[in-house]
Amino acid sequence: MNHLKRLQDLLPPAYSIAADSILTALLDIAAMEMEIFQEDLDRVRQSHWIESVYRLEDAEKLAALLGIKRLAWETLPTFRERLIALAPALLEGATGPNEIKQFVYDYISRCERVLSSTFMLGLRNVTLEQAYEPPADRPLFRPLRLLENPRIVRRSSGLAARGGKVPYLYRWQEINRGLSDTLARFAISGVQGRRTSVPILVNLTTGDLIGFMETLRFGDTLELSVSESADSQNPRLAAAARNGRDATASLFSTSGFTFGAPLLKEQFDPKPLLPRLARGPNEWVNLSAGFYGVKGLDHFFFSIAGDDLREGVFDQTFFDEALFPSGTVAQLEMEWTETEPAAFEVHVPRCIVREPQDLDLALDVPAYEQIAEGLRDSILELHAAGVSARTVFEPFRDIQRQKVRAQVSWIIIDPEQGPAGIDRFELGGRFGSSPLGGSRFG
């Protein structure tokens, strides 16, 4: 029923029967004004609700009430869906994992629906709980993931700054900023013109020592890592690979290291263990020691140095507590895995994406990249103060591991050299040539 009919119902029948009367024409003008006013009122009402707002500037004004800004590429449909998912999370605090999970699920699924696209396989027909768990019949399916206190790999920046080149007795410090102790992993390489004999690495903070009872030549690389047989009972079991081949048999470790004390094989652990990296600062030292049966004469030291022994540096070390600089004895790399405190990561699998060919975009950027940017920016707005937040999009990867090895067909024997003195071998005599005191006459 329009406004004209309502006005005619208020009049006596005699005044409203004729449709072409002057009174009806006047009432029609008033009814038209009322309908225009009603339409304007409806538009005002629509502009106050995000679900029905029809102008982008009105949506921006609604978002400004919550401190949310529109991204440059967002159109009204995409901005509306992000705002609908983000607003409840902000109003509820969004400091817990449940709110973060809800927002990620709502935002991606709503954008898929409004854009008729697919940004994550299998998300449309599952609930919130199912979106974060792989189906029972598809254990390899990668769902959404929220990782609290993620594990990140750190590398020694101090060693990297010097190209990994370390001399004998070199000391450095590493800081474990994770929530708990962790294990250190190393890569030791031989250097040109030297022999890296029996390399030993010691964490002076924990007293853990690990060494390799062989000699590395230039081009050799020794990798020390966690053994595949390590478990919860023995998480520190170590494995060694020399040029890609297992060399764990030559690996040794001990605990309770003391400077200046002999390093006896009876002190070795039954199975080699990786050194721990305690939470906080850790002091490390690079050593070398000689063992019977290991070839490396003139390339290692026959005793464990004392705590006060340093490489000689002009005007910094004492004469009786210093050695002449040995130069670079090895190239060293170090890494470890930290449990990052006050942090979380949202992992979104992005294997296959599907978008309509005629999709109207504000910028010349694929829709999945725009949605990814919106998700990243929104996650940064949601996390609590002092908490690090990251969004990781995992592409499809197919990894086929392989190793290429080459072996020479000849054997190279390292020469053994050492100071043995100088002497002359003299027998008999020759007239006019041999001195009287340096000859023996038969």
Image: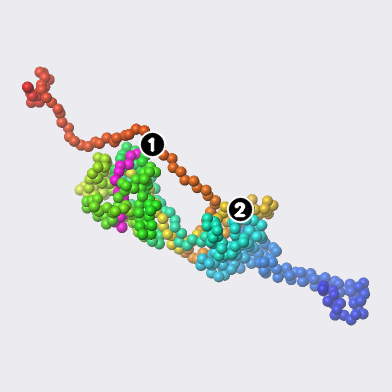
What's drawn in magenta, residue-wise? 199-218
Q: Is residue 16 above or below residue 141?
A: below
Asked if residue 142 lies left or right of residue 293, the reply is: right
Q: Amino acid at mark 1?
A: Gln
Residue 303 visible in the displayed image: yes
Q: Is residue 298 above or below residue 262?
A: above
| Circle 2 SS class | loop
Give the x, y percent position of residue 396: 54, 51
Residue 68 visible in the displayed image: no
Residue at the outermost top position: 431
Quarter placement of the N terminus: bottom right
Asked if residue 167 lies left or right of residue 30, the reply is: left
Give the x, y percent position of residue 125: 62, 61
Q: Residue at x 39, y 43 (%)?
A: 244
| Circle 1 SS class | loop
Q: Residue at x 62, y 52 (%)?
A: 366
How many marks the image carries: the answer is 2
Quarter placement of the C terminus: top left
Please, what is the dominant secondary structure of the magenta stretch?
strand
Distance between the alpha carbons at the discs numbered 2 and 1? 46 Å
Can you tell which quarter of the image residue 323 is in? top left
Mark sitting on residue 407: 1
Q: Is residue 363 magenta?
A: no
Residue behind mark 2: 353
- How packed is label 1: few (under 14 Cα within 10 Å), some, or many (20 or more)? few
Q: Is residue 209 magenta?
A: yes
Give the x, y percent position of residue 80: 64, 63
Q: Residue at x 32, y 52 (%)?
A: 272
Give the x, y percent position of residue 43: 73, 68
- How packed is label 2: few (under 14 Cα within 10 Å), some, or many (20 or more)? few
Query: What's the coloring here?
Result: rainbow
Camera-side residue: 125 or 27? 125
